[in-house]
Amino acid sequence: MSIHVPIKKLAILGSTGSIGHSTLSICESYPDRYKVVTLAAGTNVDVALEQCIQWCPKIISMATEKCANALLKLLHQADIYDIEVLHGSAGATRVATHPDVNFVVSAIVGVAGLEATYAAICAGKTIGLANKECLVAAGDLIIAAARANRVALLPIDSEHNAIHQAMRGGTPAEVKQIWLTASGGPFRNTPAADFARITPAQALKHPTWTMGQRITIDSATMMNKGFEVIEACRLFDLPPAKVRVTVHPQSTVHSLVEFVDGSILAQISVTDMRLPILYALAYPERPVSDLTFDLKSLNQLDFSPPDFDRFPCLRLAYEAAEAGPSACIALNAADEIAVAAFLEGRIPFLGIPRTIEAVLAKTVAVAPSSIQQVLEADQRARATARQVVAGGAIVS
């Protein structure tokens, strides 16, 4: 006897990105469970058009007005007139808060998705969270709003999703610490003396995952793992000292939870983002899927501590987590500016942590009380980072 499952009606923020594509793949595989209602895309008008034709969303929002106008023209040429086309943060917020939506996948990269995600929480929508910046830059506000509106924040990031799954094996009071696994990136075994000569092309070759440019560089510096430490502190209400990082190059164990009795629960699965997305979308159920894991992949499991000297970005993230909201906002903003400068050849690889450290040293500790104040602090930190890069002091 089959059990009827109510259809979840989705808003996908970041529909043209990798998480967006994987989410839509899940919707294709489970048409009786998930319906696409609204989409927020980036600047890829052609892909947005394909998604409109296939999914017929009620609203689609593009990153810019220019892209929205281009999409609207293409839709009309295809005799499609019943899709509302919007743009910018206001458009993404409309997408996330549409009255027919009850589940929002938050996957817009950067703080661009912050306002829409916060508005969705305040509107009572369940959130599948794949946007790191929401919790890094505005974690206290996001968590407080989720509690006030009784909204579930379900992590899609593979590491936090793994922690969420493993924590079902005990109570929060029984957790001793959690372990976030890290592949170590492309420079795990690179001699420290060679870091000064690392090129963007080398840094963009991640050994395990295919991702966007910024997150790939963040993985190479291990800043990505630092952001995940901050996220984990917020999501699971743990101090930084109880959020540990272990380098696991096989990337088969996605993270672990250690309990006070000495038990450790690990989550193991294929390295395919569709699995954590499906977990978040279906929670608390576990629907049947074809995402099977080959146990032969467990023939070797290596774990080692991270090298904070060779990867100072991870150290800076722990320091920001201890320092508070302003430091976390500055950490994220400075990293984005520094990574862009590195990719453009304006600073070297080691200039990324040096830029971030210089910005953190100039950051005044003030806890923002609104999303607008978070965005203002973000802009100040970006301006400071641009000054640091333009000053030419970060040369080696």
Image (cartoon, rainbow, N blue to C red):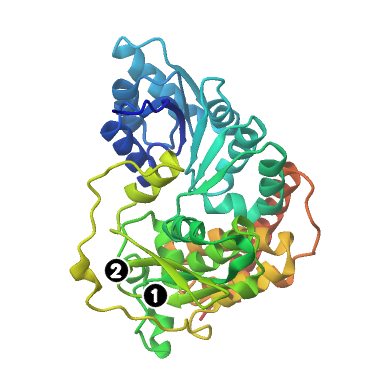
Mark 2: which amino acid? Pro
Asked whether residue 290 appears in the rendered view, the answer is: yes
Look at the picture and state if 199 lies above or below 210: below
Q: Nearer the viewer, residue 192 or 182?
A: 182
Look at the picture and state if 305 lies above or below 98: below
Q: Nearer the viewer, residue 220 or 64?
A: 220
Is residue 363 toward the left or the right of residue 289 in the image?
Answer: right
Q: What distance separates the C-alpha of mark 2 from that of mark 1?
A: 9 Å
Is residue 107 toward the left or the right of residue 21 in the image?
Answer: right
Q: Residue 253, percent across and down?
A: 36, 68
| Labels 2 & 1 near each other (Cβ < 8 A) | yes
- Looking at the image, tell me whether mark 2 or mark 1 is earlier in sequence order: 1
The residue at which mark 2 appears reads as 207
Q: Residue 135, percent across and down?
A: 61, 53
Q: Which mark is residue 359?
A: none
The residue at which mark 1 appears reads as 184
Q: Secondary structure at mark 1?
A: loop
Q: Residue at x 36, y 39 (%)?
A: 23
Q: Residue at x 64, y 29 (%)?
A: 123
Q: Nearer the viewer, residue 118 or 145?
A: 145
Quarter of the figure with residue 185: bottom left
Q: Residue at x 30, y 78 (%)?
A: 301
